[in-house]
Image (cartoon, rainbow, N blue to C red):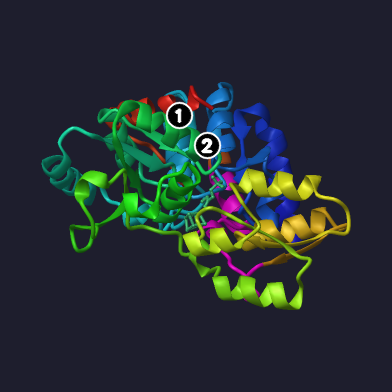
Amino acid sequence: TTEEKRSRIYEIKKQLGRRLFIPGHHYQRDEVIEFADVTGDSLQLAQLSKANKEAEFVVFCGVHFMAETADMLTTDKQKVILPDLKAGCSMADMADISQTEYAWGELQSQFGDTILPLTYVNSTAAIKAFCGRNGGATVTSSNAKAMVEWAFTQKQRLLFLPDQHLGRNTAFDLGIELEEMAIWDPIQRELIYDGNKENIKVILWKGHCSVHEKFTVAQIEDLRKTSPDTNIIVHPECTFEVVQAADLSGSTHFIIETIRNAAPWTSWAVGTEMNLVNRLAQQFSDKQIISLNPNMCPCLTMNRIDLDHLLWSLEELVEGKLHYPITVDPKTTEEANLALKRMLERV
Ligand code: 13P
Ligand code: SF4
């Protein structure tokens, strides 16, 4: 039964004590978050993984790129485990390293040495390593603005991977016009831009989050009519039009803190992953909190980690078996850590 599974997890946690560390991303299921030693957004989880020097096993409740980042930031002795290998991220999969190297070659031939690559942490270790060896850095949704500002102290343009929306929303907030942004299409292998290429400041990789793209301007317009007092807050992985039409936008951490600090009895429609929205509604019951999308928006890969997978990987661990170990090779780790370090020392 569920009760038996829960008590077995508590037993294993007690048995392993500080040898075991379970970070949980805010988008994870309630049945998993219950056992997390820490919860956080991707930046917080990266920092916490780096700070933890004592756990032998990090059972990462999140998605594959987060477990890779944890592996790269922890010591060689610490083992990082992802309870289900199918917990990937469709956005991270939209930029593979051979597509990126090809794009880089093309862009270098068009613009010379004027571009700095930045990658959202929602990317593979190989893409982070690519940014690291080319002088660039990683960014998260909580620090994208500061990192884009920094990028322009280094080079006159930037290539932003793999989320076009976070890139566009962040650059626009910093005063860069849409006309100064181009798109690199990795499938067509071409730069999409109408004007004089000299004016390009930001090249956006054509990737997106399939969860956050499901929020629409029509949903916002409906809500403005039916419930004009509702505040609309969305994640910057939503499209530019949605972010512009919303009242507020920001990282997962920003969304949580804004709602926590909001006045009682206020109403909120939230444009981010469903597990988090449901938890906010439970946690802040003095406020009315709904998903901006009436059909809700689960991240299917985040949801792969469930009670059964968590229990199974912990049982295996007790038997001395690692399922599934996430290990990034030393060269990729070294280069990717350059990119992560450039971010972590600035935020
Ligand atoms: P943050 O945790 O940085 O807000 O990212 C959201 C996300 O989509 C994680 O996969
Ligand atoms: Fe990837 Fe989007 Fe899911 Fe985050 S919410 S893990 S970006 S698919």
Q: Is disc 1 in contact with disc 2, using a CB cutoff of under 8 Å?
A: yes
Report the residue at 54% width, 64% height from top: 242
Residue 160 at x, y percent in the picture? 35, 45
Residue drawn at the location 49% of the way across and 50% of the way down: 63
Percent x, y for residue 35? 70, 45
Q: Closest to the observer: 43 or 75?
A: 43
Residue 267: image location, x then y, percent:
80, 62
Q: Amino acid at mark 2?
A: Asn
One can see residue 67 in this view: yes
Q: Work out which quarter of the rendered image holds the C terminus and state it.
A: top right
- Is any part of residue 321 visible from this angle? no
> Looking at the image, is 19 positioned above or below residue 261?
above
Question: With respect to residue 298, does 52 lie above or below?
Answer: above
Residue 157, percent from left and from top: 29, 38
Mark 2, other Cα within 10 Å: few <14 / some 14–19 / many ≥20: some
As drawn, the label of residue 343 is 1
Q: Residues within 10 Å of mark 1 (few under 14, many from 20)?
A: many
* Extent of the magenta region: 292-316
Please identify the quarter of the rendering in which residue 71 is found: top left
Disc 1 beta carbon < 8 A from ligand 1?
Answer: no
- Classify mark 2 as within 8 Å of ligand 1 or not, answering yes or no: no
- SS type, badge 2: loop
Amino acid tagged 1: Met
Q: Is residue 219 left or right of residue 85?
A: right
**Label placed on residue 143:** 2
Residue pictured at 57% horizontal, 47% vertical: 61
Left or right placement of residue 175 versus residue 1 in this view: left
Q: Is residue 16 magenta?
A: no
